[in-house]
């Protein structure tokens, strides 16, 4: 919170910053699923990764995930090096990695969908990341902005009273929404196919910051 009263002989003003927040349960899960393929040649490693990723995609679709909610996210190939005594690092093959980003719109069935996906490609599958988000946060952001405005107004009224004045018209308003990205689920990375995933949606918090300037009147 800050305040900037005007000086002597100048128009008197007060500037304050208010903060506010609102919460809502998330209704969308974003999942990143990766598959690794190891082989002696680049072509074989790539083929193994592609086969595993195709199996994951098929499992997702069989669980009702729409094709539009499944997207290829990346492909990379790297050398697989091993240290051998007396020889140093030696090339033993190649590792191809590919991944999918998936949107799960039914959080109730998300656990079974994820288990089916990570089980489709055996030990080569990786559950890289899970995030719970709001598919449409417009209403929640509006509620947060309203809370921030009332916070600023209360503070401005207090300063006006302390200065033996009253609030006049609003001279400026600046909305400074903070960077509030999706909330990740910790402890879920590199989950093996044999592990279950318990989904506890909780709530997502959206915060807002507003800075406003009022004229002060006697």
Image: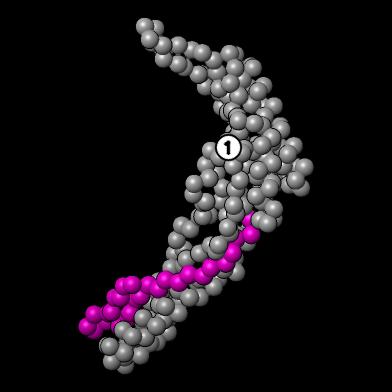
Neighbourhood count class around disc 1 (C-alpha, 10 Å): few under 14, some 14–19, many 20 upward: some
Question: Is residue 20 toward the left or the right of residue 35 in the image?
Answer: left
Q: Which portion, as a residue range, is magenta?
A: 1-28
Residue 175 is at least partly visible in this image: no
Mark 1 element type: loop
* Residue 154 vertical position relative to residue 44 in the rendered view, above or below: below
Question: Is residue 6 toward the left or the right of residue 186 in the image?
Answer: left
Residue at position x 54%, y 15% from top? Answer: 93
* Residue 170 vertical position relative to residue 177 in the rendered view, above or below: below
Q: Quadrant of the N terminus?
A: bottom left
Q: Position of residue 101 (x, y in %)?
A: 62, 42
Q: Is residue 22 magenta?
A: yes
Q: Position of residue 137 (x, y in %)?
A: 59, 63
* Residue 185 vertical position relative to residue 84 in the rendered view, above or below: below
Q: Is residue 104 magenta?
A: no
Q: Position of residue 182 (x, y in %)?
A: 53, 54
Could you say which quadrant of the image residue 31 lies in?
top right
């Amino acid at each position: 919170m800050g305040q900037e009263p005007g000086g002597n002989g100048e128009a008197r003003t007060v500037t304050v910053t208010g903060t506010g927040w609102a919460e809502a349960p998330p209704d969308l899960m974003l999942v990143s699923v990766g598959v690794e393929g190891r082989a002696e040649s680049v072509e074989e490693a790539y083929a193994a990764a592609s086969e595993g990723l195709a199996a994951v995609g098929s499992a997702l679709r069989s669980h009702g995930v729409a094709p539009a909610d499944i997207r290829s996210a990346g492909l990379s190939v790297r050398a697989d090096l091993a240290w051998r005594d007396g020889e140093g690092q030696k090339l033993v093959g190649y590792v191809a990695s590919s991944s999918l980003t998936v949107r799960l719109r039914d959080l109730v069935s998300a656990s079974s969908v994820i288990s089916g996906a990570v089980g489709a490609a055996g030990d080569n599958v990786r559950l890289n990341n899970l995030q719970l988000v709001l598919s449409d946060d417009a209403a929640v952001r509006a509620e947060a902005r309203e809370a921030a405005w009332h916070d600023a107004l209360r503070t401005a009224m207090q300063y006006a009273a302390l200065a033996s004045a009253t609030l006049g018209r609003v001279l400026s308003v600046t909305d400074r929404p903070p960077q509030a990205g999706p909330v990740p689920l910790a402890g879920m990375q590199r989950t093996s196919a044999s592990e279950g995933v318990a989904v506890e949606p909780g709530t997502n918090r959206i915060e807002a910051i507003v800075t406003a300037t009022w004229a002060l009147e006697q």
